[in-house]
Image (cartoon, helix red, strand yellow):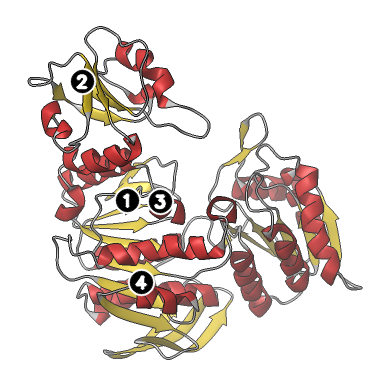
């Protein structure tokens, strides 16, 4: 992908050119906001971050081949030959030039965005399965990984930054993907990482407290989520056929609905909706439900379990119907769907009790999986969980209360403590546990996550269910001074083999 630098500058009418002003024949071969990713011919975008400042890496960028830099601060020393483009706000400028540079790839694709506190990952994979069943080529952008068809692309953020996202979408368009199904985080919406993206379907799963360390208030968190549906309704959109898919059982749906001007499809279990789940029968290894809609009744025998997954299935059905996919194709895909890594995932090493690993790291997520465990449990529920450091502290006692409310044995441990003291986090969780602790309930605090999992497995007896929550698909643990390899599933397998 190449563009004349002058064409990029034309998008920034108030830009001031400093240093080398011979921009007419300069060709830009790539964009980068990370100096480590610069190759010859790159335009380096200097962002002023909370921890690092791109302006400090201009000389390094120049030596790595950057031919121009986009800045918002005065530069004392300009390397000879480097073109400096000064604007009022480099982040806003980047949002204008990145989609243009990559030739607005979202306009060449059908874009399905999924937002909400929980359920985003499973919903995206359910939609992908339906679209593939219908014969489409599908790319996925999300928490676990990014994929272009069957090709896996590493991921760092749930929603990549503007340049990386536009580059990825351009790769998907070039690979002839028909659809992109994308998790759209509240951070991405608040920071406008999706600038230049035109969505065709937007899905709202649910809204519970999370990320308040970033958004500060629940209202600002809700406003961030709502932005996806405002983008759907934008008068600047080039594609037709926009649909919002909303969970009416969640009280936030009414707020979003008022601010959405495109076609809507609602879904739910409790309240009346366009898509209604009926006769739900939650079983240990699957779920039976009937979905009522304009097509009539669709009976489903699913291989995934839990009432929370019924909501995810409804959302996926809504998206598929919005894109004109036949109900028979939807049914076939859903009944074949197995599971998503780290989402209520059974770990079976022949042990006489069940072990389930799940990504649940919010109060709502934890309550969902514990309610499901309660529905299928024959005996005790043993809960291993923690709360991440440097994140919303208010949810810690709430999750402690939920764990002891639904669990018989609770072992509080470390999640990703980051820069915080693990014992401090555990004490804040313990405050909630003690509020609902009654005779017969047992709890322990074990900061070492491996030791906590080992303790739970040794305590477990025949027909118990061990729930290990918080990390799911993650294969690492972030500590104060380093990141270590750590995979809950692999740890469980190793310990069970050692126990035999």
Q: Which mark is residue 316?
A: 4
| Mark in the foreground, 3 or 4 | 3
Residue 198, percent from left and from top: 23, 57
Give above or below for 272 relative to 432.
Answer: below
Residue located beneath label 1 in the image: 194
Seen in the image, is 363 located left or right of residue 459?
left
Residue located beneath label 3 in the image: 188
Residue 486, percent from left and from top: 62, 40
Seen in the image, is 318 located left or right of residue 485?
left
Residue located beneath label 2 in the image: 41
Report if the CB atoms under discs 3 and 1 are less than 8 Å apart. yes
From mark 4 to mark 1, how far is it between C-alphas? Answer: 22 Å
Q: Earlier in the sequence, mark 2 or mark 1?
A: 2
From mark 3 to mark 4, how far is it between C-alphas? Answer: 22 Å
From mark 2 to mark 1, how far is it between C-alphas? Answer: 25 Å
Give above or below for 154 relative to 500.
Answer: above
């Amino acid at each position: 992908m190449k563009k004349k630098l002058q064409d990029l500058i034309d998008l920034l009418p108030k830009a001031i050119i400093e240093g080398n002003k011979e921009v007419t024949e300069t060709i830009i071969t790539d964009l980068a906001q990370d100096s480590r990713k610069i190759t010859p011919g790159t335009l380096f975008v200097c962002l002023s971050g909370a921890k690092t400042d791109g302006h400090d890496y201009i000389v390094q960028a120049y030596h790595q081949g950057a031919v121009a830099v986009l800045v918002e601060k005065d530069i004392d020393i300009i390397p000879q030959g480097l073109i400096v483009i000064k604007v009022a706000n480099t982040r806003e400028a980047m949002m204008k030039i990145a989609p243009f540079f990559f030739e607005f790839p979202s306009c060449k694709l059908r874009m399905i965005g999924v937002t909400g506190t929980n359920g985003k990952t499973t919903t995206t994979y359910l939609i992908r399965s339906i679209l593939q069943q219908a014969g489409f080529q599908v790319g996925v952008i999300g928490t676990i990984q990014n994929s272009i068809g069957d090709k896996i692309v590493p991921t760092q953020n749930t929603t990549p930054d503007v340049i990386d996202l536009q580059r990825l979408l351009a790769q998907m368009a070039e690979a002839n993907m028909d659809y992109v199904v994308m998790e759209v985080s509240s951070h991405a919406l608040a920071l406008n990482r999706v600038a230049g993206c035109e969505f065709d379907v937007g899905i709202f799963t649910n809204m519970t407290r999370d990320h308040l360390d970033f958004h500060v208030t629940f209202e600002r968190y809700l406003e961030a989520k709502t932005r996806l549906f405002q983008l759907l309704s934008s008068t600047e959109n080039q594609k037709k056929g926009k649909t919002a898919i909303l969970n009416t059982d969640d009280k936030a749906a009414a707020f979003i609905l008022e601010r959405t001007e495109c076609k809507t499809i609602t879904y739910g279990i409790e309240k009346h909706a366009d898509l209604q789940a009926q006769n739900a029968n939650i079983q240990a290894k699957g779920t039976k439900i009937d979905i009522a809609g304009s097509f009539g009744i669709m009976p489903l025998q699913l291989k995934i379990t839990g009432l929370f997954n019924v909501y995810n299935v409804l959302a996926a059905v809504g998206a598929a119907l919005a894109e004109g996919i036949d109900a028979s194709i939807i049914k076939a895909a859903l009944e074949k769907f197995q599971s998503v890594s780290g989402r209520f995932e059974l770990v079976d090493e022949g042990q006489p009790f069940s072990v389930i690993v799940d990504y649940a790291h919010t109060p709502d997520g934890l309550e969902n999986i514990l309610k499901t465990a309660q529905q299928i449990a024959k005996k005790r529920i043993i809960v291993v969980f923690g709360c991440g450091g440097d994140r919303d502290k208010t949810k810690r006692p709430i999750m402690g209360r939920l764990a002891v409310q639904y669990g018989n044995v609770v072992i509080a441990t470390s999640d990703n403590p980051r820069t915080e003291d693990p014992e401090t986090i555990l004490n804040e969780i313990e405050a909630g546990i003690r509020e609902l602790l009654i005779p017969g309930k047992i709890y322990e605090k074990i900061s070492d996550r491996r030791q906590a999992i080992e303790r739970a497995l040794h305590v477990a007896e025949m027909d118990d269910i061990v729930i290990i929550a918080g990390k799911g698909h993650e294969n690492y643990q972030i500590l104060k001074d380093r990141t270590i390899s750590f995979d809950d599933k692999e740890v469980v397998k190793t310990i069970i083999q050692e126990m035999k």
